[in-house]
Image (spheres, grey):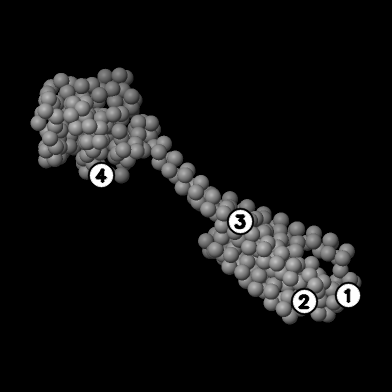
């Protein structure tokens, strides 16, 4: 995906460079109308033998391996080279032919390179500063525009500053949008309290893992976990401590299920779900017992009217060796039924169903 995106961006930049070269060529026709005939040869040499070939040299560079990473530096350099080529044209036109060649190309080159080609803010600022110094130097040695030197200099300086500042604002907006999109994507997938997957993402990732398990003929297991007497705990200690207990459950799950393929999520309220593949019934039992043992070690005092003195959780699990005909919803229902039975059996325990006990299309 990233490779495709880079390829499309490079293609877009090549098109922008070609369009830039064509625009520069079209300026030749307009300029020739204004230029005195003695300037034709020098003008055409500057445009056709330097400025346009420089753009095509950059197009050739776009086929190199380092181009994408260095593109902003290359385009900033292109901006400076085109600008100073224009300064040479202005200087020579005034010194040799006493003709005041327009300076507006300086501004067009800057906006073309910064916005059409995407020079970053810092490089745009640096290239603009170099161009400004160059123009001030040009006006110092060749007051081309006579009594309009000051206003012309102010216009160039102001335009290049606005160009760099506008790029800064644009870059900031893009960064903010990317950051916001990333946060929104995270919020759409994660439970904000536990940083585990939310129910929607949990189901989506579970379906993905189930499909993979079917293709690769892997075993598949679903765990449903629920904090025992959580309402009593919440009523006794308040919602803040209730939230702390929920976060603790998420931490216990992360400590037990550490494989990259393990899917952990908050199913709703104090109920959680874990989906794994490639495990045996024995491994599922070990994971369940490890969760219970970890809660025993925590020894978190429970509400006075709770069924146990310390906080615990109940677990219902299901594991199948052949998932070809299984559905995620059916497996969740089976695991949820085992959880209900574990609660009825006294809480703080787990119950496990294996393939032979499962109604395949439940």
Q: Residues within 10 Å of mark 2 (few under 14, many from 20)?
A: some
Residue 225 visible to the viewer: no
Q: Which residue is mark 2?
A: 143
Q: Is residue 212 above or below residue 101?
A: above
x, y percentage for residue 213? 33, 35
**Dot 3: element:** helix
Residue at point 58%, 68% (across, down) = 126
Say which of marks 3 and 4 sits in front. Answer: 3
Sequence-first tag of 2 and 3: 2
Q: Which residue is mark 3?
A: 166
Q: Quadrant of residue 268?
A: top left
Residue at point 25%, 44% (across, down) = 258
CA gap, disc 3 to disc 4? 47 Å
CA gap, disc 2 to disc 3? 30 Å
CA gap, disc 1 to disc 4? 79 Å
x, y percentage for residue 107? 70, 63
């Amino acid at each position: 995906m990233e490779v495709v995106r880079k390829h499309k961006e490079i293609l877009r930049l090549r098109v922008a460079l070609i369009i830039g070269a064509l625009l520069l060529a079209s300026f030749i026709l307009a300029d020739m109308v204004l230029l005195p005939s003695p300037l034709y040869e020098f003008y055409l040499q500057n445009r056709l033998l330097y400025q346009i070939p420089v753009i095509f040299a950059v197009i050739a560079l776009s086929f190199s391996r380092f181009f994408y990473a260095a593109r902003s530096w290359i385009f900033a350099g292109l901006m400076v080279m085109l600008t100073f080529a224009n300064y040479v044209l202005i200087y020579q036109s005034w010194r040799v032919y006493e003709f005041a060649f327009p300076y507006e190309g300086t501004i067009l080159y800057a906006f073309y390179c910064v916005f059409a080609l995407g020079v970053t803010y810092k490089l745009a600022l640096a290239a603009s500063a170099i161009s400004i110094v160059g123009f001030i130097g040009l006006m110092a040695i060749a007051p081309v525009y006579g009594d309009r030197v000051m206003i012309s200099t102010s216009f160039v300086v102001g335009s290049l500053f606005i160009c760099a500042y506008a790029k800064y604002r644009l870059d900031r907006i893009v960064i903010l949008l990317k950051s916001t999109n990333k946060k929104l994507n995270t919020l759409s997938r994660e439970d904000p309290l536990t940083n585990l997957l939310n129910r929607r993402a949990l189901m989506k990732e579970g379906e993905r893992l189930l499909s993979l398990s079917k293709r690769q003929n892997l075993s598949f297991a679903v765990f449903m976990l629920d904090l025992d007497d959580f309402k009593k705990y919440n009523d006794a200690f308040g919602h803040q401590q209730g939230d702390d207990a929920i976060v603790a459950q998420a931490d216990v799950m992360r400590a037990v299920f550490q494989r990259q393929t393990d899917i952990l999520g908050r199913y709703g309220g104090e109920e959680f779900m874990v989906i794994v593949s490639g495990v045996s019934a024995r491994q599922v039992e070990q994971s369940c017992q490890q969760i219970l043992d970890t809660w025993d070690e925590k020894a978190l005092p429970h509400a006075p009217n709770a069924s146990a003195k310390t906080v615990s959780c109940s677990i219902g699990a299901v594991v199948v060796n052949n998932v070809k005909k299984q559905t995620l919803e059916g497996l969740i229902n089976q695991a949820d039924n085992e959880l209900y039975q574990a609660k009825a059996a006294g809480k703080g325990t787990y119950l496990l169903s294996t393939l032979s006990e499962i109604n395949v299309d439940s």
